[in-house]
Image (cartoon, grey):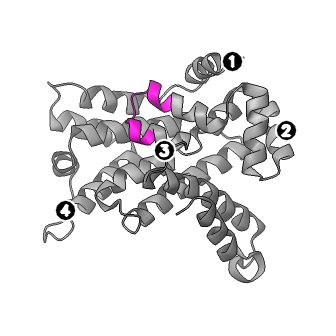
Amino acid sequence: MNPTELRGRIKAVCPVPATAQRVIELTSSENASIEDIAEAISLDAGLAAETLRLANSASAGRRVKVDTLERAIASVGMRSLHEMATGMGMLAAFASDNELSQGFHQRALNAGAIARFLAADAGLGPQRSVAFLAGLLSEVGAMGLLAVDGEGYVALLREADGDVVRRSELEVARYGCPSRELGAELLRSHGLPETIVDAIRGDGDDVLTHLVTYVREAAAIIADVCSEEFDAIEAGGIGDLLEAAALRANL
C-alpha cells in the first residue's frame, strides 16, 4: 500500500467524530450564529475547555474572565476555532481501547501541553494555540498507521525500540514514507494550516518545527518514565534525556 492509499485508508477507518464535523461545518459557514456554534462546541468537553482556555489566554491582563462559550467564540474567532476543531477532531478519530493506541493518545496530549507551555519561551507567545495544535498532532501519522496496520506497526515499533531514526527508516521501508510525512499529508488533506503541516513533517528550520520535533520525543520520554512508576529525576535521568532531546531538536 503506497502513501496515498494509506491516507485514504486511514481517513476511511478513522473518520472525524460527528460533533467535531458539525463545529468544522459551522465555523466554515458565513451564516452560522455564535449561539449555534456554542451549542455544538458544548457537546465536546475537550473542545469546549480548550476554547475557553484559548479565549482567556488571548485576553490575559483583562479584569473580566471569559466564562461563556459565546464570549469565547467571539474572542477566539472563527478561523482559530475551525483549526482547533479540525485538529482535536482528528485526534479523537484515533481514540480506541487498544493499549498502544491509548499510549499514543496520551503522548499527543502531553506533547500539546508541553508545546503550549514552551511557546512563549520559544518566541511563539501569540501563537500558543498553533503550538498546542502542532504538538497535539505531532504523532497523528503513527496513530493512523497503528489504526490500519496494527500488528505490523506494533512489530515495527518493537524493532525500533525507541530509536526515532531507526523507526523512520523502518517506516519508509514498510510504507514508503515516515509517519511524520504521512501525518503532515493527513493534516493538509483536512485543511490544517501549512505552518502546522510543515512543522509536523519536520523539514523546516523554523522555531515551530524545532518545538514539534522536541515535544514529540519529550512526550515519549515522559510516557516511558511514567509507565515505570519510579522517581523520574533520580532513577530515570529524565532531565538528562529531555536536555539531550532539546539539543537534537536545536531548541
Q: Position of residue 214 (x, y in %)?
A: 57, 58
Q: Which residue matches tag 1? A: 2
Disc 4: CA contacts within 10 A as few (<14), some (14-19) or many (>=20): some
* Identity of the residue drawn at 44% across and 51% down: 206
Q: Please name the amino acid that badge 3 sits on.
A: Ala
Q: Main secondary structure of the magenta part?
A: helix
Q: Are marks 1 and 3 in contact (CB under 8 Å)?
A: no
- Mark nearer the N terminus (4 vs 3): 4
The mark lying in front, picked from 1 and 4, is 1
Q: Are marks 4 and 3 in contact (CB under 8 Å)?
A: no
As drawn, the label of residue 59 is 4
Q: Which residue is mark 3?
A: 199
How far from the left and from the top, in percent, is residue 215? 56, 57
Callout 4 amino acid:
Ser
For the residues labelled 2 and 4, say whether their Cβ atoms are less than 8 Å apart. Answer: no
Amino acid type indicated by mark 1: Asn
